[in-house]
């Protein structure tokens, strides 16, 4: 098909012409439509008008009318400027939104003590547990499958974190008959679940343990359900974390300070001689600041949709849970929500050499992850929220810091 088109010397037009000429069917190759600049500056419009206006001049009147500037051309230009999300994506977005609500209910049922007690109407605790687990597996799978086709990144980031927690608890889940398949969804063996007993299920989903599998999933589902998005409308959600990294940066500084030797330098007497006494007030002030910034960081950053932030908050939470007993000895208690509270008298009466020894490791370790939380909040707000079948993160820079986590 030989068509001569007058496009002048405009470089964008030359590029478009080359793309057009390379297609075997004249207009078969439409890759150049993605060149937004050519659309914006009008060169693409001129080319299309030239093509449809003169190239088909020998066509019948019906054909000319079909390809008039008031028909196909405007529709193509409008579609390229304002692309619409496919029906499949719209369906996935809607399914993810409703699925998260259902999953929240099924997790809540498994965290409820009433699920594990017999009822007066004769329904056994095991029957109720099996029913609750079936609902959980179904709702979990619906969310995972919907997330794979969804564009609501402020929700899929939490799904990624949820899947990662599930992968980390694979052995415990297997003990109650729940396995993870290659696609990241769950399968339930009812016989094995019954053999395991209700107590193991209840322990795994315990709401009293902030590090339990159930508590972690409940937290992720809660934030996924409350995150801002264009739910069910089908529009791509480009919402990213707007949380300031100030509290994370401050926690990093506090952690390093508590791990430093300078903070525990012995006080000097009036003659300038070193004594065996610590500046307890100074050390307590640093510990109090650490506790305050720790809580503020979680209060703000937990609602982030950034998978890098969520991953490092999880590491911090785990490290704190492992050291809860040691912290308590120094008057620092950790509540069920993972927040800290410090008792001044208990802390000041502690052996400061033991405080130094503890924070040498714990403080510097928390500082490392707090630094990464600050990094992702302030410089990587658009980090990938994609995930694999096992919920592994696709976060830029994650491999760089893998050895510190």
Image (spheres, helix red, strand yellow):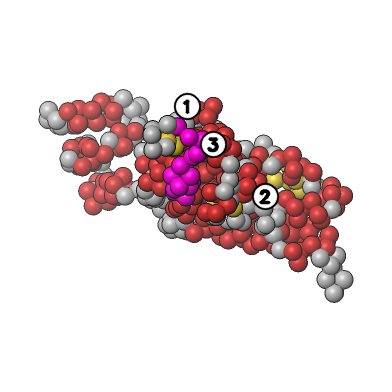
The answer to whether the residue labelled 3 contacts the one labelled 1, judged by CB atoms less than 8 Å apart, is no
Quarter of the view holding residue 372? top left
Q: 10 Å neighbourhood of mark 2: few (<14), some, or many (≥20)?
A: some
Q: What separation in Å lies between label 3 and label 1 (alpha carbons)?
A: 29 Å
Mark 2 or 3, closer to the camera: 3
Residue named by callout 3: 356
**Residue 184 at x, y percent in the picture:** 64, 41
Counting residues from the start of the chain, the first of labels 2 and 3 encountered is 2
Q: In terms of secondary structure, where does tag 3 sit?
A: helix
Q: What separation in Å lies between label 2 and label 3 (alpha carbons)?
A: 30 Å
Q: Specify the farthest residue to the front.
A: 271
Return the residue nearer the eye: 293 or 13. Answer: 293
Q: In terms of secondary structure, where does tag 1 sit?
A: helix
**Residue 219 at x, y percent in the picture:** 57, 54
Q: 10 Å neighbourhood of mark 3: few (<14), some, or many (≥20)?
A: some
Image point 17% across, 41% down: which residue?
42
Q: 10 Å neighbourhood of mark 1: few (<14), some, or many (≥20)?
A: few
Residue named by callout 2: 212
Image point 41% across, 47% down: which residue?
247
**Residue 138 at x, y percent in the picture:** 68, 54
Residue named by callout 1: 400
Vertical relation: 292 (above or below) 131? above
Magenta region, residue range: 274-289
Q: In terms of secondary structure, where does tag 2 sit?
A: loop
Left or right, 358 with respect to 72, comes to right
Q: What separation in Å lies between label 2 and label 1 (alpha carbons)?
A: 28 Å
């Amino acid at each position: 098909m030989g068509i001569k088109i007058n496009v002048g010397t405009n470089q964008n037009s030359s590029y478009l012409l080359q793309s057009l000429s390379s297609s075997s069917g004249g207009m078969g190759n439409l890759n150049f439509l993605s060149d937004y600049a050519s659309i914006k500056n009008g060169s693409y419009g001129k080319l299309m008008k030239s093509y449809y206006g003169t190239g088909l001049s020998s066509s019948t009147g019906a054909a000319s009318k079909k390809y008039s500037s008031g028909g196909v051309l405007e529709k193509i230009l409008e579609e390229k400027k304002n692309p619409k999300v496919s029906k499949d994506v719209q369906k996935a977005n809607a399914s993810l939104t409703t699925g998260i609500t259902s999953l929240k209910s099924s997790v809540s049922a498994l965290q409820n003590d009433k699920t594990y007690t017999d009822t007066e109407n004769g329904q056994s605790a095991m029957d109720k547990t099996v029913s609750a687990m079936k609902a959980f597996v179904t709702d979990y799978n619906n969310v995972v499958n919907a997330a794979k086709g969804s564009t609501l990144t402020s929700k899929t980031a939490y799904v990624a974190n949820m899947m990662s927690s599930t992968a980390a608890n694979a052995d415990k889940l297997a003990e109650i008959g729940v396995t993870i398949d290659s696609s990241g969804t769950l399968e339930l063996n009812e016989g094995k679940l019954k053999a395991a007993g209700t107590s193991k299920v209840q322990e795994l989903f315990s709401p009293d343990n902030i590090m339990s599998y159930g508590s972690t999933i409940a937290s992720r589902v809660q934030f996924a359900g409350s995150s801002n998005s264009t739910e069910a409308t089908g529009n791509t959600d480009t919402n990213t974390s707007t949380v300031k990294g100030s509290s994370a940066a401050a926690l990093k500084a506090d952690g390093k300070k508590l791990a430093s030797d300078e903070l525990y330098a012995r006080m000097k007497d009036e003659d300038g001689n070193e004594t065996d006494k610590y500046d307890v007030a100074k050390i307590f002030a640093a510990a109090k600041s650490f506790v305050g910034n720790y809580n503020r960081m979680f209060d703000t950053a937990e609602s982030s949709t950034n998978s890098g932030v969520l991953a490092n908050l999880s590491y911090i939470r785990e490290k704190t849970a492992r050291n809860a007993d040691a912290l308590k000895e120094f008057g620092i208690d950790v509540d069920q929500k993972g927040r800290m509270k410090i008792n001044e008298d208990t802390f000041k009466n502690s052996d400061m050499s033991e405080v130094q020894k503890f924070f040498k490791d714990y403080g510097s370790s928390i500082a490392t992850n707090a630094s990464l939380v600050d990094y992702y909040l302030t410089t990587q707000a658009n980090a990938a929220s994609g995930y694999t079948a096992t919920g592994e993160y696709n976060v830029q820079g994650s491999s760089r810091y893998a050895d510190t986590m």
